[in-house]
Amino acid sequence: MKKKLLSVLLTVVMVASVFTGCSKNSSNKNEGKEASTTTKTEESSSDTSGGGLVGVAMPTKDLQRWNQDGTNMEAQLKEAGYDVDLQYASNDIPTQVSQVENMISNGCKLLVIASIDGDSLGTVLAQAKEANIPVIAYDRLIMNSDAVTYYATFDNYMVGTKQGEYIKEALDLDNAAGPFNMEVFTGDPGDNNAKFFYNGAIDVLKPYIDAGKIVIPSGQLDFATVATANWATDAAQSRMENILSSYYAGGTKLDVVLCSNDSTALGVENALAANYTGDYPVITGQDCDIANVKNMIAGKQSMSIFKDTRTLATQVVSMVDAIMKGGEAPINDTKSYDNGTGIIPSYLCEPVFADLNNYKELLIDSGYYSEDDLK
Ligand code: BGC
């Protein structure tokens, strides 16, 4: 079993590393977007030295990516011989807290948590710590809790810098005269990632804003003003509608909208579809959600950051496996993520961007989506 697992792991890691730069460590087979949820067999359970129940807490089913994350985690953990308690919390914090409580009382040996609000799990995680249950923060860092053992994510600051660089290239900011009109939409203030995305992008664009080459007609730029509660599409849409009617009514051209992710970009695109007649601006996104990739193909979104959820799942499964066998999890970052109790040892996967030029290779050839998904 070990040998078989190893060869499967190597294959997947090789495929995944081509696209995301996550190249080390063990992994499991999971080639399709909808991972097969193979149930644990007698053979795999008896062959696994570290098997046990692993709790996986995901924030919501409303956003496509978390469905993929959950499916991939469950499939890959089962394939590695673990039982899985996978829960979604409908973006409701008390629901997530009680799901984690149940995981602890149901005998989970390790918890993998993508938090809804990074600050709301302290009390329940104190129980986990008391019971010696290791915790891996998945994608989003859990703040102000010393129960967090490891963190696995894509490099969130790099997500932002890639969005900023994309805008810089698309508008040729170093050479074009400008000025260009820009608006900004970022994510939920309770999600520690949102600030990293925002800072990464603004660090790239700030010199051009300071030089007057990028202007923001609404004046809305500071993080709190451009944050979007729950990353909600309709909230982004209504803010964009207000901006359009207040600042762009007289035919003012909108050149670019920096959106931290696809759910906010979709809101912006919906607002533009109903209220804006000029050429579509450059719009950034993240996640390569199907609706957004379709918009990209239709010329309504310029790019999206691709974070292959299979790769993150693979990485986390290798961390789970190492911890469950009494070892240390593989990490590659010990400086970026302080959760308020100290630095959390992290594994950061590398994000890439997808646009019209490379989406087929990244998304279809890799098996993430089928052609039909994008029709
Ligand atoms: C994730 C993004 C996602 C956003 C909204 C962030 O924490 O890193 O990939 O778009 O949450 O769910």
Image: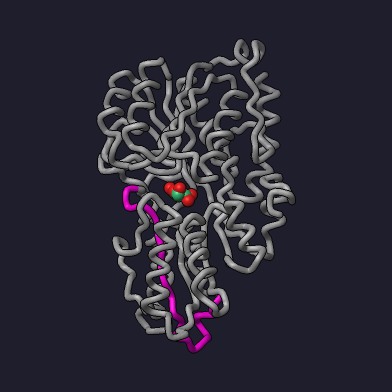
Q: Position of residue 216 (x, y in %)?
A: 38, 77
Residue 314 relative to residue 238: left or right: right
Q: Position of residue 68 (x, y in %)?
A: 57, 40
Q: Is residue 117 visible?
A: yes
User: Residue at 68% across / 39% down in the picture?
Assistant: 32
Identify whether 240 is placed above or below 19. Answer: below
Quarter of the image holding residue 94? top left
Dominant secondary structure of the magenta stretch?
loop
Quarter of the image holding residue 334? top left
Identify whether 315 is placed above or below 352. Answer: above
Q: Is residue 9 visible?
A: no
Indicate the colouring scheme. Answer: one colour
Quarter of the image holding residue 40? top right
Which quadrant would the C terminus be assigned to in this image? bottom right
Residue 127 relative to residue 110: left or right: left
Task: Say which of 192 and 98 sits in front.
Answer: 98
Task: Say which of 330 and 43 sits in front.
Answer: 43
Identify whether 8 is placed above or below 81. Answer: below
Magenta stretch: includes residue 82: no
Task: Say which of 107 and 243 sits in front.
Answer: 243
Q: How many marks?
A: 0
Q: Position of residue 363 (x, y in %)?
A: 67, 51
User: Residue at 58% across / 35% down in the picture?
Assistant: 72
Magenta stretch: includes residue 171: yes
Which quadrant would the N terminus be assigned to in this image? top right
User: Residue at 53% across / 19% down in the picture?
Assistant: 83
Task: Say which of 179 and 157 sits in front.
Answer: 179
User: Residue at 65% across / 14% down in the picture?
Assistant: 41
Identify whether 59 is placed above or below 249. Answer: above
Residue 355 relative to residue 105: left or right: right
Q: Find the magenta span and give its range.
A: 170-190
Q: Position of residue 284 (x, y in %)?
A: 52, 64
